[in-house]
Each structure stands twice: as C-alpha cells, then as structure tokens.
Image (cartoon, rainbow, N blue to C red):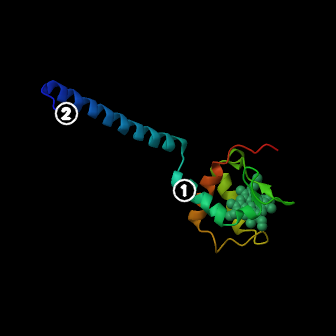
Amino acid sequence: MVFRDPGIKKIIKILFLIVLLQVGLLVINVCAQQVLKGEKPELISSGKNVFEEGNCRMCHLVNGEGRKFEGTVDVTGIGSLYKEPKLREILIKHLFEKPDIHKYEDALTKEDIEALVQYLSTLKTPSPK
Ligand code: HEC
C-alpha cells in the first residue's frame, strides 16, 4: 500500500505504538497478578512433578484421583487447610522424620520440598466426598 498522505503514516505509527503499549501493559498486568497472589508458576509445576515422580500418589489422592485403599489420604484442599509455613513444617516432618512411612531423605532436596509446598498450596478446593 502506498500512502500519499504523510498524515496517514503518522496515524498508523501511532496506532502501532498504542497496540505495542497495550500488549506491554497486558504482560506486566499478568506478571503483577502472579506476584500479588504470591504464585510461582515454575515452582508450582516442578512441585507437581515431584509429587508425581516422588510416589506421593502411592498413598495420596488429589481431586479423588489415585489408587484408593484403606489409609489413603486425600490432600486436595490442603492448600486451604494450612498456610505455607505450616505446610512446610508438616511436609518436612512427614517426609524426613518418619522413616516408617517412606524414606525420602535421599530422594528429595530442599528445593523439592519448596516446590511441593508451592504445589500443595494450590490445592484449595476439597473434592466432594
Ligand atoms: C507410604 C505412604 C505415604 C507416602 C508415600 C506419602 N505419604 Fe503423605 N501421608 C501419609 C499418611 C498415612 C499421612 C497421614 C498421617 C500423617 O500425617 O503422618 C500423610 C500425610 C500427608 C500430609 C498431611 C495431610 C494432612 O491433611 O494433614 C501431606 C501434606 C502429605 N502427606 C504429603 C505427601 C507428599 C508430598 C508425599 C510425596 C513426596 C507423600 N505425602 C508421600 C502417607 C504417605
């Protein structure tokens, strides 16, 4: 397209800048919301991985999914039951200090625990019983 009128080019430039600005604002907005909510997306998804690969499902259900047997504990809703520090404390006790349940000392790092805390914190809605 050829614009003879230099004014149109200017308008198109300005429109382009406005669109660019909008996209920029949108990105900032989404990031800010995650920061405000205290969500750490990478940690949450790596926590989910740790949960799946750390055999937590052997004994735990999430949203009612998993192997059910006498003694399975559904951890759905755990995020609204405990705040982060308490959840961290429970996890460390549960996974490191009760060798009768499962040995995790060698399998899980501090980072894994942190990721698990973040992931479990997102499990807020208890599954319907
Ligand atoms: C061998 C079975 C077993 C495995 C494997 C296991 N857990 Fe547990 N978990 C339990 C039992 C039993 C309880 C409830 C009694 C207790 O707190 O000791 C529990 C309790 C919990 C609780 C507290 C639940 C509440 O409502 O208080 C959390 C959180 C938890 N487990 C997370 C995990 C995670 C994360 C993993 C994997 C890294 C894991 N568990 C692996 C058996 C297991």
Q: Up-down: is 17 above or below 61?
A: above
Is residue 93 visible in this depiction of the protein?
Answer: no
Look at 68% across and 71% down and name the residue there: 104
Q: Quadrant of the N terminus?
A: top left
Q: Is mark 1 within 8 Å of ligand 1?
A: no
Look at 15% across and 29% down and name the residue there: 3
Residue indicated by mark 2: 1
Q: Position of residue 42 (x, y in %)?
A: 52, 55
Is residue 39 visible in this depiction of the protein?
Answer: yes
**Viewer-proximal residue among 10 and 77:** 10
**Sooner in the amino-acid sequence: mark 1 or mark 2:** 2
Q: Quadrant of the C terminus?
A: top right
Among all residues in the image, which is located at the extreme right? 70
Return the mark for residue 12: none
Q: The residue tagged with tag 1: helix, strand or loop?
A: helix
Residue indicated by mark 1: 43
Asked if the residue under mark 2 is in contact with the one under mark 1, i.e. CB atoms within 8 Å, the reply is no
Q: Position of residue 101 (x, y in %)?
A: 78, 68
Q: Up-down: is 63 above or below 91?
A: above
Look at 85% across and 60% down and name the residue there: 69
In the image, what residue type sits under mark 1? Leu
Q: Up-down: is 89 above or below 121?
A: below
User: Where is residue 10, by image quadrant?
Assistant: top left
Classify 10 Å Cα crowding around label 2: few (below 14), some (14-19), many (20 and above): few
Spatial CA distance of label 1 from label 2 is 48 Å
In the image, what residue type sits under mark 2? Met
Q: The residue tagged with tag 2: helix, strand or loop?
A: loop
Q: Position of residue 25 (x, y in %)?
A: 38, 36
Among all residues in the image, which is located at the extreme bottom? 106
**Viewer-proximal residue among 11 and 77:** 11
Look at 19% across and 26% down and name the residue there: 8
